[in-house]
Image (cartoon, rainbow, N blue to C red):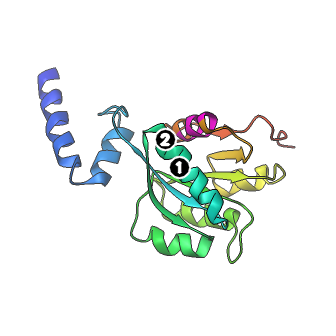
Amino acid sequence: MAEENKALVKSSIALTRFDPKARKELVVRGLIALSGVKIEVFIVDDHKVVRNGIREMLIAEGDFTIIGEAEDGVEALEKLESLSPDILLTNIKMPKMDGLELTRRVTQKYSSCKVILLTLYDEYLTNAMEAGARGYLLKDIRRKELAQAIRHVHSGQVVISEGVKALP
């Protein structure tokens, strides 16, 4: 039976090279390990310099692929129609559609996409969690901490920056 499972996983892994959704399903079901699998991230922030910095920080870690970027929630939703990121990393305060509304919409429409809010403000934690966020990080976070937080959220954990006040 164990040999049968190994053969199934081997053939499934070969198929996932052509079908990213199938690969994600195997990871979720625990049939393949995350090692060697890049976490696909979509970045949303209204400041281009912030998006560029986050992109460079994550690429330097080696286990992330940036599959898209947007400057607000409206643009993000348009682009997400054709993408399937593991993680959506978004700012809260943005024009057109803020990060909280974006989080609500993404978590309702794309159940496999986990949302992390990256912000200057610690007072929106309750709203973020109610909207479906899996992470709430302050922008003063260091590169290694950001990368580790994304990995934790990707593996199913909820992550909140240490500097954020506790929920009331």
Q: Which residue is mark 1?
A: 56
**How far, Cα to Cα, is label 2 from label 1?**
6 Å
Q: Examine the image and state in which quarter residue 18 appears.
A: bottom left
| Closer to us: 40 or 156 | 40
Whether residue 64 is in magenta: the answer is no
Quadrant for the N terminus in the image = top left
Percent from the top left, x then y, of residue 162? 76, 34
Q: Is residue 156 visible?
A: yes
130 shown above or below 68? above
Whether residue 147 is in magenta: the answer is yes
* x 85%, y 40%: residue: 165
Check disc 2 and give the amino acid type: Ala
Question: Which type of secondary structure does the marked residue at label 2 adopt?
Answer: helix
| Closer to us: 131 or 61 | 61
Few, some or many residues within 10 Å of mark 2 (<14, 14–19, 20+): few
Q: Examine the image and state in which quarter residue 145 appears.
A: top right
Check disc 1 and give the amino acid type: Glu
Percent from the top left, x then y, of residue 160? 70, 39
* Magenta region, residue range: 144-150
Lateral position of residue 106 relative to residue 68, left or right: right
Marks 2 and 1 in Cβ contact (< 8 Å): yes
Q: Which residue is mark 2?
A: 60
103 shown above or below 8? below
Percent from the top left, x then y, of residue 40? 43, 50
Q: Which residue is situated farthest in the right direction here?
A: 168
* x 59%, y 34%: residue: 144
Q: Examine the image and state in which quarter residue 152 appears.
A: top right
Quadrant for the C terminus in the image = top right
106 shown above or below 152? below
| Closer to us: 129 or 38 | 38
* x 22%, y 48%: residue: 17
